Image (cartoon, coloured by chain):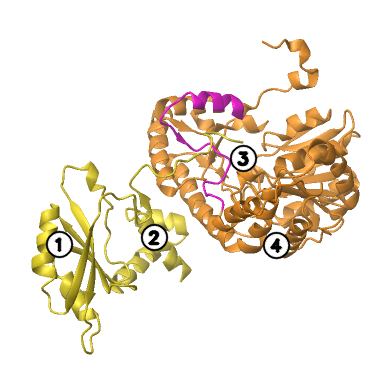
């Protein structure tokens, strides 16, 4: 047993993820239907997998440049222009990372000094706060709620800004709520961001999974490119979670700073994944469209299912989660999830794992077939009858 | 058109979906769904709502065979007349015109191998225009209509992920 004294204080003080805690509980259960995963149920399209195999076949097993393959950066530049009307120079303003997770870490490490504050809308992805703390920054939550479509408002934002606030993380489409920020929502907070000289870390990993309209990147708004660090990756849109391929688009100064960290800690993303990523961008548009359409159908189905059972359920416009309220059951989200698991063998994630504002909700993933969702809904209905 | 295709694909995947469920999934009203399905049935696009059964897991004894058949096409009718003639037997589950060394692929069902052998020898082979038959018994089904009969590939994702 390793003694506590060997572990750094900063690591010791980071609480374990609420998801992790629940994961341990779930792994000890058997025959469960899980609606708990945050990754596509599709296999990576064949053309991409084939490229991964071919890369190995060709014997391309080397490091690449720190920023990543030039052809991949060019492909990403093309993709960002085509889909989001963003202009990034592939030579100087794009870098490839090991998933969007590394990108989050790099962005924070390049920006933060000891004690700098970073605004994090809540509920949101579980990693932001720990990553801020590991960088010796201070996460400051900006709570969002269902009344405001889980979107941050200028007033909420202003109320949390201090002279130590350095950056704002903007995670839309959002995990776990499925909320998006429309162009007008982004425009509303623009003045606050610019007036307070904030840098925006815009996590757009779910950008391609937007329903009822097109995703708008804050970097495309006037005056924002120079103060945005845009993060994205291949995991969600191309069903490539295990390939660990992400990227950052930002002004050259930011890229240069992040690349300093990246070159010493990671060197480069795996070459197989990088070549596969090029194929993904140029040859898999139809695959993305098909997956998005399927998610959209499931989204309608599961939201309707939860509402019919009697849950209040916010209508998500992006990602692949719904975030139904369980407040009227009187149970905490942990209690609800543990009982649902025990009684009906259904795994969903307690909302409190996603920070303040998440209590009273559960995250339900619909990255599953309609058949499986149907079976799960039957069990959830049986459970609800007992507790409502 | 695309909503029509959506309905066809959804029913092809699961023919037990109700009109209401289809309406929720597609965003169409229930009446629109009903109308589209009615039209598709009338146009003979939707022919039957069937169930895929793994007979191996039941007590029923079923043997199936795929029979490659070479035939002489008939004047003015090509392969259609003979294909329809073959299709009239209850034992015949499907008949398709195929490319390659044979003309027709006929799937036949019986209780025993012997029953199928008798069907081929006494009913199928003697039909006018049938030149030859090659019978392949199906020993085990792994996948049909997109569904695995074995356990299929597992969902390898972790049960809960961020």
In the rendered image, the vertical position of residue A143 relative to residue A215, given as above or below: above
* Label 3 sits on residue: A176
Indicate the colour of chain A. orange
In the rendered image, the vertical position of residue A138 relative to residue A99, given as above or below: above
Q: Is residue A59 magenta?
A: no
Inspect this view and state whether residue A369 appears.
Answer: yes
Inspect this view and state whether residue A332 appears.
Answer: no
* Label 4 sits on residue: A83
Q: Nearer the viewer, residue A103 or A35?
A: A103
How packed mark 3 is, by other alpha carbons closer than 10 Å (few <14, some 14-19, many 20 or more), is: many
How packed mark 2 is, by other alpha carbons closer than 10 Å (few <14, some 14-19, many 20 or more), is: some
Q: Nearer the viewer, residue A336 or B154?
A: B154
In this view, the mark in front (4 or 2): 4
Alpha carbons under labels 3 and 4: distance apart = 24 Å
Q: Which chain is yellow?
A: B
**Left or right, residue B38 beside residue A178:** left
- Tell me the SS state at disc 1: loop
Quadrant for the C terminus of chain B in the image:
top right
Residue A236: % across, % down:
62, 48
Residue reaching furthest bottom?
Answer: B76
Tell whether label 4 touches label 3 (CB within 8 Å): no
Q: Nearer the viewer, residue A98 or B24?
A: A98
* Label 2 sits on residue: B30
Specify the subunit that label 4 lies on.
A
Specify the subunit that label 1 lies on.
B
Q: Is residue A39 magenta?
A: yes
Alpha carbons under labels 4 and 2: distance apart = 34 Å
Alpha carbons under labels 2 and 3: distance apart = 31 Å
Residue name at image x 12 percent, y 75 percent: B127
- Tell me the SS state at disc 2: helix
């Amino acid at each position: 047993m390793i003694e506590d004294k060997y572990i750094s204080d900063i690591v010791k003080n980071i609480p374990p993820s609420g998801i992790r805690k629940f994961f341990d509980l779930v792994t000890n259960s058997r025959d469960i239907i899980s609606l708990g995963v945050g990754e596509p149920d599709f296999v990576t399209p064949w053309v991409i997998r084939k490229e991964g195999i071919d890369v190995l076949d060709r014997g391309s097993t080397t490091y690449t440049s720190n920023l990543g393959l030039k052809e991949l950066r060019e492909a990403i530049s093309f993709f960002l222009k085509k889909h989001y009307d963003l202009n990034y120079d592939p030579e100087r303003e794009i870098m490839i990372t090991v998933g969007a997770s590394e990108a989050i870490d790099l962005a924070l490490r390049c920006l933060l000094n000891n004690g700098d504050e970073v605004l994090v809308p809540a509920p949101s992805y579980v990693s932001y706060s720990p990553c801020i703390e590991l960088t010796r920054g201070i996460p400051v939550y900006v709570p969002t709620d269902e009344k405001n479509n889980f979107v941050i408002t200028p007033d909420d934002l202003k109320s949390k800004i201090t002279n130590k606030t350095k950056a704002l993380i903007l995670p839309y489409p959002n995990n776990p709520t499925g909320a998006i920020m429309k162009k007008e929502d982004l425009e509303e907070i623009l003045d606050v961001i610019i007036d307070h000289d904030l840098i925006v870390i815009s996590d757009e990993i779910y950008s391609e999974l937007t329903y009822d309209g097109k995703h708008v990147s804050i970097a495309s708004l006037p005056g924002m490119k120079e103060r945005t660090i845009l993060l994205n990756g291949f995991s969600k849109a191309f069903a490539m979670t295990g390939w660990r391929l992400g990227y950052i688009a930002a002004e050259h100064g930011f890229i240069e700073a992040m690349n300093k960290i990246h070159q010493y800690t990671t060197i480069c993303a795996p070459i197989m994944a990088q070549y596969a990523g090029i194929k993904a961008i140029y040859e898999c548009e139809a695959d993305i469209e098909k997956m998005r359409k399927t998610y959209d159908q499931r989204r309608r189905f599961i939201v309707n299912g939860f509402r019919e059972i009697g849950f209040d359920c916010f209508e998500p416009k992006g990602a692949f989660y719904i975030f139904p309220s369980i407040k009227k059951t009187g149970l905490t989200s942990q209690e609800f999830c543990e009982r649902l698991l025990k009684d009906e063998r259904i795994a969903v994630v307690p909302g409190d794992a996603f920070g303040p504002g998440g209590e009273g909700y559960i995250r339900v993933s619909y990255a599953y077939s309609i058949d499986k969702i149907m079976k799960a809904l039957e069990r959830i209905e049986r459970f609800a009858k007992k507790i409502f | 058109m695309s909503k029509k295709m959506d309905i066809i694909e959804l029913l092809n995947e699961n023919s037990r979906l109700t009109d209401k469920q289809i309406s929720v999934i597609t965003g169409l009203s229930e009446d629109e769904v009903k109308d589209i399905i009615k039209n598709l049935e009338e146009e003979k696009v939707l022919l039957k709502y069937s169930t895929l059964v793994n007979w191996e897991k039941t007590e029923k004894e079923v043997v199936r065979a795929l029979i490659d058949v070479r035939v002489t096409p008939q004047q003015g009718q090509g392969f259609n007349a003979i294909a329809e003639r073959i299709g009239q037997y209850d034992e015949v589950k499907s008949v398709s015109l195929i490319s390659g060394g044979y003309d027709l692929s006929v799937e036949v069902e019986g209780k025993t191998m012997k029953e199928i052998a008798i069907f081929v020898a006494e009913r199928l082979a003697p039909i006018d225009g049938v030149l030859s038959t090659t019978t392949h018994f199906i020993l085990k089904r792994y996948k049909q209509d997109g569904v695995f009969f074995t356990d299929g590939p597992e969902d390898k994702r972790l049960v809960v992920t961020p």
